Image (tube, rainbow, N blue to C red):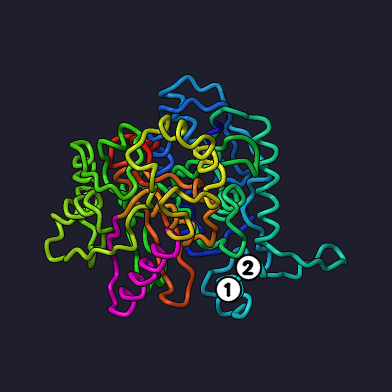
Amino acid sequence: MTRVIIVRHGQSTYNTEKRVQGRSDASRLTEKGRSDSTQVGKALSNFLFNAIYSSPLQRAKDTVDIIHRELTIHTEQSAIPQTSDLLMEIDLPLWQGMLSAEVKEKFREDYRIWQETPQLLRMSVKDGEETREHFPVVALYEQARQFWQEVLARHQNETILVVGHNGINRALLGTALEIPPERYHSIQQSNCCISVLNFSGGLGEPVQLESLNQTQHLGDILPSLRPNHKGVRLLLVRHGETEWNRQTRFQGQIDVPLNDNGRQQAQKAAQFLKDVEIDFAVSSTMVRPKETAEIILQYHTDVNLELQDGLREISHGLWEGKLEKEIEQEFPGELDRWRTTPAQVQMPEGENLQQVWERSVAAWESIVQTALANGLKIGLVVAHDATNKTLLCHVLGLSSEHFWNFRQGNGAVSVIDYALGKNGKPVLQAMNITAHLGGGVLDKTAAGAL
């Protein structure tokens, strides 16, 4: 496995002024940006990086220098930061340096395209005496692919740190996970956030997003809402651990309760979300998510818990109650198919992912529409590993073939915003937050079976 830790630079002067930065190098880190960069270094202080890459733009270079200084205090870092032009921010030459409000006013139609179909944004750029057509997002995706092709070949089975920008980081995540350019705005990167990708090989081979947009090391429980947010935020949680998770026994729709550790995980999730103003809560009908939700809601006593059968776990049929070695003996080769081509597997006397997709997405969309219709702002949704992974594919416009791209730890929290209400695409603001469970940056919960 090649582990890649991706960090966005610290808050900059252009960030605070709400200016479009692009490839301008006029912007500098603010005091907060420098302080937050120190916190990133502390959060990553138990990693020994084989290589550290940064954008050559000053705000990213300053961020990586501060992180590296902090790392060298705590570990014998042999890796020296090096810059790569392939980590440059998205190139927006006609907007660079302008206030966002000015861009919206002066380039009204282009800004609408940028928001709704970013892959179609086109700029006519003078190149000497020639004029060329520039597609910023498409070009950025190609740049990101090139970075992965070069770097992954160079660092097989190593741990690397990448410090970039909002745009290029999204493109790096998008190309790794095969999120199309039209969903460029569907993932978010906060200043000094931490995301973790695990590659099994090169680009195009299996990859797992372990976490996205962690901000807890900065003192932020959850990433902040986008400006002009007017929709609903959903906190998607996986239930706490069960004894069968610990044993790696497939539970599916057998109603296994939480074990003691699972109840502790739920308690930690409850503490973590204690001060979040939750308006409504929904859980799968099964006992393990229901108990997890009830423990979280101990600090939100005015919120009623609604149960949705569509959110229940996948039915593994004849695999349920069995360990992996027992399944391999009875159904040779099927576990490997489940791990490599999950959308093609029909569980014996159980479900396939299409059936899980249809019922869980219908439940999810019903939750979203009800919340929007009633002006509700923040909702808790507690479900299962397979259900959550299916919903994450749906949110990002991916097919269920990408099911294994997402990690969901027991007691982990993911954040999905419908910032534009009914009219806009959902945004995965953060995924698989497990910092409250005591593992630091990495997910240390039991991997477990489903």
Where is the N terminus found, in terms of image quarters? Answer: top right
- Could you tell me which residue is drawn at 38 percent across and 39 percent down? 449
Asked whether 366 falls inside the magenta stretch, the response is yes
- Say the numbered circle drawn on residue 95: 2
Q: Nearer the viewer, residue 232 or 221?
A: 232
Asked if marks 2 and 1 touch (Cβ < 8 Å), the reply is yes
Location of residue 110 (image quadrant): bottom right
- Say the numbered circle drawn on residue 218: none
Q: Which residue is mark 1?
A: 103
Q: Nearer the viewer, residue 21 or 360?
A: 360
Q: Position of residue 370 (x, y in %)?
A: 31, 75
Q: Position of residue 185 (x, y in %)?
A: 53, 63
Q: Label 2 vs label 1: CA separation?
A: 6 Å
Q: Position of residue 75 (x, y in %)?
A: 44, 22
Element on which disc 2 rests: loop
Q: Position of residue 128 (x, y in %)?
A: 85, 63
Q: Is residue 412 visible?
A: yes
Is residue 387 rendered to the left or right of residue 107? left
Query: Label 1 neighbourhood size at 10 Å, few (<14), some (14-19), many (20+)?
Result: some
Label 2 or label 1, whichever comes before in sequence order = 2
Q: Main structural element of the magenta stretch: helix, strand or loop? A: helix
Seen in the picture, residue 163 relative to 69 is either above or below; the reply is: below
- Could you tell me which residue is drawn at 55 percent across and 53 percent down? 170
Q: Nearer the viewer, residue 378 or 77?
A: 378
Is residue 145 rendered to the left or right of residue 223? right
**The residue stretch that appears in magenta:** 356-382
Is residue 225 rendered to the left or right of residue 286? right
Location of residue 442 (image quadrant): top left
Residue reaching furthest top?
76
Task: Give the total of numbered labels.
Answer: 2
